[in-house]
Image (tube, rainbow, N blue to C red):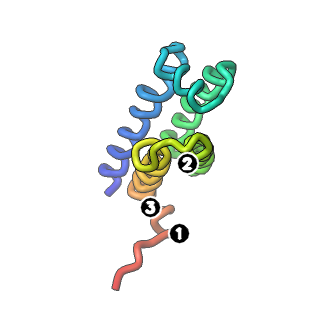
Amino acid sequence: MAKTGWILSGLFALFMVGASAAPKLLGLDAATSSFDALGWPQRYVLMIGLLEIGLTLLYLYPATSLLGAVLMTGLLGGAIASQLRVEALLFSHTLFGLYLGVTLWVGLWLRSPRLRDVFPLMTG
């Protein structure tokens, strides 16, 4: 279970760093144009990219993984709200933050016996 959890957590982290934070930190058009489409000022691109890196690191470090997961969930909720506000496509854009959040939490649940004790699977 723990190995699968670390794989899911690693995939989540790779996405957050490689596909989300890196374009923001590099000022790539993919990041800046999406901010324009969402109505966000360009001055927040770098800050959100740095926040994504920081929260991902908190999530990966076992001692702070729960704090990182909670804070990252808040960030993903903000992304969902931003997509809702501009009436973006539901399944591909608006709910993408939800898909990431589920991956985040399933990965943490699988790699953390303490979290599994608090939230056990109910069977039968």
User: Which badge, 3 or 1, comes first in the chain's sequence?
Assistant: 3
**Which of the 4 quarters of the picture holds residue 76?**
top right
Q: Spatial distance from mark 3 to mark 1, Cα to Cα?
A: 9 Å
**Which of the 4 quarters of the picture holds residue 1?**
bottom left
Q: Is residue 105 left or right of residue 76?
A: left
Mark 3, residues whose alpha carbon is within 10 Å: few (<14), some, or many (≥20)? some
- At 41% from the left and 26% from the top, the residue drawn is 18
**Which of the 4 quarters of the picture holds residue 116?**
bottom left
CB under 8 Å between callouts 1 and 2? no
Q: Which residue is mark 3?
A: 113
The image position of residue 122, as x and y in percent, is 41, 78
Residue 7's mark? none
Numbered-mark total: 3
User: Which badge, 1 or 2, comes first in the chain's sequence?
Assistant: 2
CB under 8 Å between callouts 3 and 2? no
Numbered disc 2: secondary structure: helix
Numbered disc 3: secondary structure: helix
Q: Which residue is mark 2?
A: 69
User: Which badge, 3 or 2, comes first in the chain's sequence?
Assistant: 2
The image position of residue 29, as x and y in percent, is 49, 16
The image position of residue 4, as x and y in percent, is 30, 51
Q: Quadrant of the C terminus?
A: bottom left
Residue 118's mark? 1
Q: Spatial distance from mark 1 to mark 2, Cα to Cα?
A: 15 Å
- At 47% from the left and 29% from the top, the residue drawn is 20
Comparing marks 3 and 1, which lies closer to the viewer? 1
Numbered disc 1: secondary structure: helix
The image position of residue 7, as x and y in percent, is 32, 44
Please determine whether, in this image, residue 83 is positioned above or below residue 32. below
